Amino acid sequence: MRPSPTPASDRPRSPAAQFATTDRLSDYWRFYWAVAEAQISRWLPAAPSRLLDLSSPDFHGTPRAVAAGHDVVTLLPSADMAMRPLTLVNGRATVPRPASRGRLRHVVGDSAFLRSFAPGSFDGVIADNRVFSRQLATESSMAEVARVLRPGGRILVCVDSVVLGMALLAEQDYWPELSHAPSADVLLVPWPDGSITRCFTAEQLTEMVTEAGLELEWIKPRTVLSASTVEMMLARDPRSMGRLVEMELHAADSDDYVGVHLVASAHKPR
């Protein structure tokens, strides 16, 4: 007697399904952005500051920064998007509005070229949401960030890791490319939607930051818990989100760079 096939809903999800189709992993993505917001909250300056956000109009950390009293300039790809309110793609409630709320301004421009901003214009730059992995000439973008930062200013950046890149190459049967991926100086990976992403090792991300004249503070994976682990634990106890996030924050503080995304913080020397 032949065993019945495993239902599609019970089969392990591929990297492409996990990270290119967010509506199929609502529980995981709620967890992912909760971790991201906790990391961003830890990173934000203590005093009200002027920040440049390159992370796209629907970036979850922008409302968090504004609510914390910072003035944020968000770069938009087109004027049409300036009319849209910033929303959280996972449908969670917006950040409460305290009395010390900062200002949010929309500016149309290219996040790869910041020539409309004078040198030393910002106290901090947020380049999250994989924005630098989608800009293939990342070194030029990082140099522009260094230019617009004031001395002592900081950047928070999130990129795709080689771990994710190799998984995507294997899934799409790019075996010759996969064999060279670990030693490649630049790893460009096609995504199922036809886009190209640039993936980094911790060493490559460190080198890019330092070559731009910035000093690395720390680098860590955004998440190390797998999507299946998160979904299983939330299915058992929907109230365990806070414990999962705290567990993730402690796990990501290790030196194990196994996550699909790498997060780094650096500052411009005074």
Image: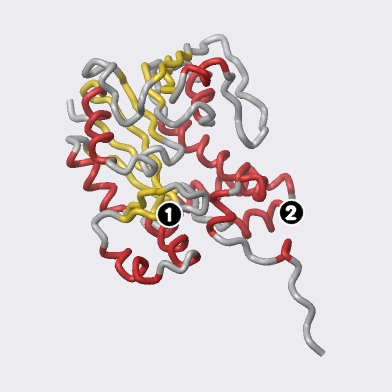
Query: Residue 214 in the image: x percent, y percent?
Result: 21, 35
Query: Residue 159 in the image: x percent, y percent?
Result: 39, 45
Q: Is residue 1 left or right of residue 174?
A: right
Read off the residue under disc 1.
Answer: 190
Kind of element beneath mark 1: strand
First-in-chain label (2 vs 1) = 1
Q: Crowdedness of circle 1 by 10 Å Cα count: few (<14), some, many (20+)?
A: some
Nearest the eye: 110 or 267: 110
**Could you give the CA–CA distance between mark 2 and mark 1, rounded to whole angstroms?**
33 Å
In the rendered image, the residue lying farthest to the front is 194
Q: From the image, which quarter does the N terminus lie in?
A: bottom right
Query: Residue 195 in the image: x percent, y percent?
Result: 45, 47
Read off the residue under disc 2.
Answer: 235
In the rendered image, the residue lying farthest to the top is 99
- 145, above or below 237, in the image: above
Figure colour scheme: secondary structure
How many marks are shown on the rendered structure?
2
Query: Residue 123 in the image: x percent, y percent?
Result: 31, 21
Q: Residue at x 48, y 13 (%)?
A: 102
Is residue 228 in sight in this rendering?
yes
